[in-house]
Amino acid sequence: MNIARLYPLPNALIYVTTLRAFNSQRANFGYLYRHLIMAGPRKRPGVSTKKLRISTSSRDSLGRSVKPTHHVYGVNALAKKSVDARERRKARHAEMTPEEQRRIEAMREVPTTSNTNMDCDGEWQDINIHDVLDGTIPLDISHAGGEFAALSDAIHSDMTKKHQHRVDLRTRQDRTTCRELAFERQMHALTDAYMEWSASNDNRDEAGYFCAPKPGDISADSGSVKIKVVNVFASKNAVSLPILPTDKYIVSALVRQGIMPCSPISPSVGITIHCLELYRITHLRDPHLSIQSWVKSLCDLHSVQFQRHLSHQFSIAFDVYLQIRSQTHQRVQNILQRNSPDWRLKHACPACTYKLKDEVPLLFKMLYAVDGNDSLRRILRRSQSRDDDETLGDSSELPGAFKIPGDRYLSREYVDTWADGVLQEMLGDDLDLDDPDYNPCADRWKNMKDDLTKKMWAIFDETGIFLALCRHGFCLVIADMVQSGELAKYPLAMVAKMLECFGDGLGCGYDIGCKFKTTLNNSPLGHMARDNHHRCLVGAFHGHAHNRICQLDHLATYISGLGLEDLEGCERAFSKSNSLAGSVRYASIFHRKQAIVTYFEHNDNFEVYQNLSKFMLNNYEQALGILDSTPDALANAMRDLNVTNVTVFEDWRAEEKEYLIGLKKEPLEETLHMEYLQKLINLQAAEQDVAAAMSIQWATNTSASMTQGKRDSTRTTETARRHALEKRDKELAVVWALEQRLGIEHRWDSSCAEWQETARLVVRRKYQRALDTLEGLIVARMFELTKMNRSQTGYSLRKHISKALQARSSAIKTALERYNTAAAALMPPRPPLHWKEVVEYAFLADFDLLRDTRQDISQHPWATPAGRLAMDSYYKMCRATEEIERLNVEIPRLATYLRDEDIYLRTCEEHVRAFDKPLSHQIHIHRKERSRFTVNHLRRLHEISQLKGFSGSITPGESIEKGPGASAGTPNIQAPTEHDADRDEQTVGAGTSDIIDEDETAEDMEDDEAAEEAEEEETRVLFDVLHVSGDS
């Protein structure tokens, strides 16, 4: 494969590569790559090319960093500085011992190789770049032999040259780690200050605006600090902010006044909490909004020029702000006694988990869905490999002091515990059709096997997320898929966690639930799942693309107790969360998880919870609509079918399953008979060719009839006869072998009964093959139509799918013609299918019923259109009845939860106000968040009660859970003792001078942003090259 592509990159960097089969040397590629890169060094503004600027920093008597000083050296000054430097080096050299001098000289004598366009044998490789670009000469790259590592090194080298940095003995990792550790040590004080500010700011008329203190407002016993304050619509320079004697740190003093610092020791810039909160809410509502876009918007509002270090400052302040909010939330949960392990998971959904006394038991106590998505994958940042190492470098991810709070994420270690012992079962052996547990969908749905053997490119670390949602859409748990596809360990870890928290009576929806059921049973978790009656199900959408035998056991229509639930909530969740993909692709491990967790927390609290009562209203209306319109149609169908009892539909389903199981494999004897017939036909054709060759008369040539250059016809005739005889002998040998294996004493001919019966089998096989082809095209068309109409599908992808659908439609028409031809050849002929019927197929059951040609099933009622419609109507009514039964249980749960939660939070708020007003205010904010939708919920519950046919109750009941932290429980809140307060002070009172000795400057941040941009650009180029090459 020969591919050439032009990649436009920033700063006029042009990268052109041509890829083919990979077998060239590393040096060849390095030579070509350097000739294809045109990038000039970065120019720093404000510095002449003939002068050098050197920045130095110092500290005052208190140890605080002062403003750095800059010195500009001209040509003469630089020459003098160089002479002085040489003199100092000579003096140091004279002080060295002879052994030290020899070591220095040895280090200087390291050989260098500049002829990178020479091969491994030292021979010059003359490469014409234009021949490579037009495809005349292939450029070969391979993962073997070091070419891939050479590609990565070459790109990194060019990006490094493109972004030049000033000399700094501290690494970015040092600065980041020290900064986060310094903030972490002050987090307790920062949280106290934030809660104090929040409580005081909520009562002011000017809440939402920053007002700088007046000089008279600062008392004589208070200190002050001057910083630049950035607000939403304006920024103020050198704002003097007071530092009270009660302030533990400078940064806590700033937070107490609504300013989030960008540095943990001596901040010079602060961003208002209102500005950070506005971005947080806006970003959660529109995850496409990045920090850089937001900072650029602020620069436009403030009429200043955007600089990259401003984004870095905002990012630091935003991370600290989110950590403070997390600590505040944890304090609220602690005082509410909701900090026990897995408390959030056990109370994630009021409708699923808030159980009441004397409620009707349900077959499935809780329904949830799991699925994987690869949109939220993240690039793995690697260090450069050593010169003698041809493999990719190790991970260069920066370790951080900030942690992701909560239990929403399953750790990698927990997920990996379910990887051992499952791999062999996942790969398995050849499918055994005689196995009673044989799953006919194992061939069609290959998430397990294909994704298991799929090898992700080495540039990705997390390749997506695996998600579990309850039937109402609340996020239960999340796991990262690490350098893999949907391995079995991810759903196994989800099931293990759910069984651990909820126990008996769970139903799990998965698009390959039929296959996963076997995996779960054979895993170490199988015994626990069976004891707790855990059941694996298939979503309604994916279920219709499964084999009909699988549908009869797993399709949502036939599952008792499932109601109208489709178990496709993950698909809906992914359609919205995919908007996070752009912001997490090049993020760090921490920032990616932080973005995902905050998104799903916000989605649960302000989207799913808001629509909970709407979900119940819509489902109740749907179920009542089915029960209102379907009974009459079902009664008419049963009368036409002469059916008197609905129990017959269960018998029909069992009969259909038994019939289809008998079709899962052709008998071996039939297969050999068909093969024997085909070889007899081939033998007859070969004998006819021999007879034709033998009938040709020999030509007699004379000297007069021969012309110069004309080939002798005798030789041609003899060759044709020899080939015909050899072909006949070959076919005859195969026929003899089959006759011996089948025990046939007399060879068949077209007049014998065996020939005619086997001929019908051959015709039937052609019919089956034509039907398989048509079915496969219809399945592909169904999924492409769904993807085309899915939210967040871009224009380019829609256009590509549209073209694929046009080609698919042409293929379906061709396959339809072949099918009708094969169907007409049957005895008796099958009725033809028409284009309109085929393209409107939403279910694949009819395909399976077309498969059998050994017996006439047209007389079976379950095989007729009227019978199948009656069956569907019956099961639809059953599921609608079950949905109403489930909703009649969930509606009182919600009504009771709304009452109990409000009472519990109000009581806790009053108790805490007596000894901690800031914490009481945070409980008040938490209560307002939970109660903002209460009026809406009550209105919808009233609408449900007014529905014609409503059979439940909206009256609150009594919860069975009254333990610590339960909404129906009694708060047991105790004020902290003085000993607890002193212990907290000792824990967080450690200083930060041993962590960080110098604050980051704007130039440090500018370099960091440039380095991050270079890394993203480097990875993007590498990803594009691999994508084009197609070598994974």
Image (tube, grey):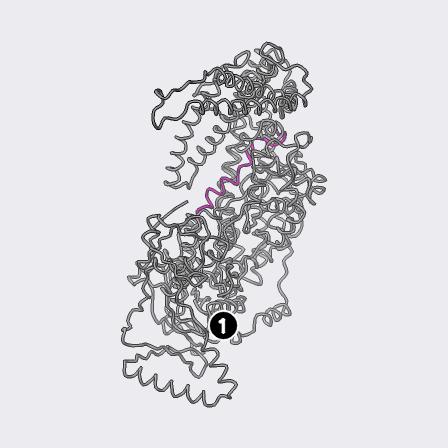
**Near-viewer residue (336 or 51):** 51
Question: Quadrant of the image for the N terminus?
Answer: top left
Residue 800 lies, in percent from the top left, at 39, 37
Report the residue at 46% width, 66% height from top: 255
Residue at x-position 49% and y-position 83% = 102
Establish if 725 lies above or below 1010: above
Say how many tags the image has. 1
Residue 282: give x, y in percent of width and height: 41, 52
Q: Is residue 983 above or below residue 762?
A: below
Residue 707 lies in the magenta-colored region: no
Instruction: Say what amino acid the circle numbered 1 marks.
Output: Asp
In the image, residue 787 lies at what x, y percent? Answer: 44, 36
The magenta-colored residue range is 559-579
Q: Residues within 10 Å of mark 1 (few under 14, many from 20)?
A: some
Query: Is residue 211 in view?
Result: no
Q: Quadrant of residue 427?
A: top right
Q: Is residue 1000 left or right of residue 464?
A: left
In the displayed structure, would residue 410 be above or below residue 823?
below
Give 681 or 896, whichever is nearer the viewer. 681
965 to 798, vertically: above or below: below
Q: Would you say residue 976 is visible in this rendering?
A: yes
Q: Nearer the viewer, residue 126 or 753?
A: 126
Q: Is residue 569 magenta?
A: yes
955 to the left or right of 60: right
Residue found at the far front of this picture: 703
- x, y percentage for residue 662? 65, 23
* Residue highlighted by disc 1: 247
Extreme residue in the top direction: 751
Helix or strand or loop: what does disc 1 sit on?
loop
- Name the quadrant containing residue 89: bottom left
